[in-house]
Image (tube, rainbow, N blue to C red):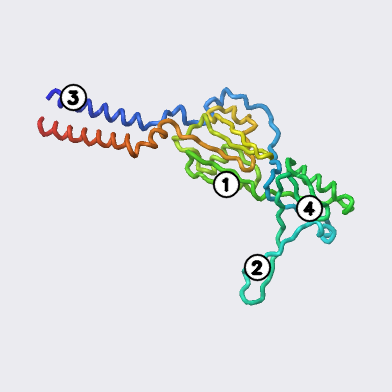
Amino acid sequence: MKLLSNLPKFTATIGIIIALASCTSYKEVPYFQNIDQATLSEVQALYDARIMPKDILTITVNTTDPQVSAPFNLIAQTPNNSNSGTNATTQASLQQYLVNNNGEIDFPVLGTLKIGGLTKNQAEAMIREKLKPYIKETPVVTVRMIDFKIAVIGEVNRPGQFTITKEKVNILEALALAGDMTVWGVRNDVILVREDAQGKKEYQHLNLNDANVIQSPYYQLQQNDILYVKPNKTKAKNSDIGNSTTLWFSATSILVSLASLLYNILK
């Protein structure tokens, strides 16, 4: 009977333990916890993506007379499926350039151009310079990356690969695309996987609890970067809960309920 008399206290204790086991410490959740003390006054140059091997580009050359620039624009003819019947039509579209492993493309008239490692502005300037012997006026050269992609995986709400049309994205924007971290995500150790032009991978650990991460050279992402958000210890332990801990908690809850029932009957 002494055990039964202490049952309400025992039940409350079990409830507190379960609640504490399922909670994530609040101090681990907010980003930029030291924002008031962080040094963020330094002005950094605006990020400009650099062309990498395996990038897919579109390059256009425009002049006041379209006939002058026509030889320098690759136009692909693709079937137009909007028309029915036997009379097939074609639709003109810009030819895409695939940057090879040496950072080169094969450009009309000019031949092989090494543009790997250049920014878009630098590539445009180089092409304009090489066009001088062929075009009297200064042409408008436009280089666009059409496959600027990043991936966000791990403890986020919508993991996946994302295409960035503006060719510029930072870590917070990438997390926003993925629906932000879950409460189980480790914010002080986000892993960035990056591959350079030679195919060498590097791994960086980023602390998003620290506002100074904005000053990091890795804050702005590059094409093909991968962000991995690790689960915290609670989530990692809970990954095995389906087979062990949850069953233990369920069994404990059942025993507590039965004990409460017996206590009320025998009271």
- Residue 156 pos. (x, y %): 49, 40
* Numbered disc 4: secondary structure: strand
Q: CA distance from mark 3 to mark 2?
A: 80 Å
Cα distance between the residues tagged 1 and 3: 57 Å
Q: Which mark is residue 107?
A: 4
Element at label 2: strand
State the residue at coordinates (69%, 66%): 91
Q: Residue furthest left?
A: 266
Which residue does the numbered mark 2 point to in the structure image? 80
Q: How many marks?
A: 4
Q: Give whichever of discs 2 and 4 has the lower sequence position.
A: 2
The span from disc 4 to disc 3 (Cα, nearest Å) is: 84 Å
Relative to the observer, which residue lies in front, 153 or 25? Answer: 153
The reply, left or right, for residue 144 in relation to residue 62 is left
At x 78%, y 50%, the residue is: 141
Dot 3 or dot 2, earlier in sequence: 3
Residue 58 placement (x, y as % from top left): 72, 52
Circle nearer the N terminus (2, 1): 2
Assess disc 4: are there few (<14), some (14-19) or many (≥20) residues with their C-alpha within 10 Å of its C-alpha. some
Q: Quadrant of the N terminus?
A: top left
At label 1, counting other C-alpha atoms closer than 10 Å, the crowd grade (few under 14, some 14-19, many 20 or more) is some
**Disc 3 vs disc 2: which is toward the camera?**
2
Mark 1 lies on residue: 162
Residue ID for mark 3: 6
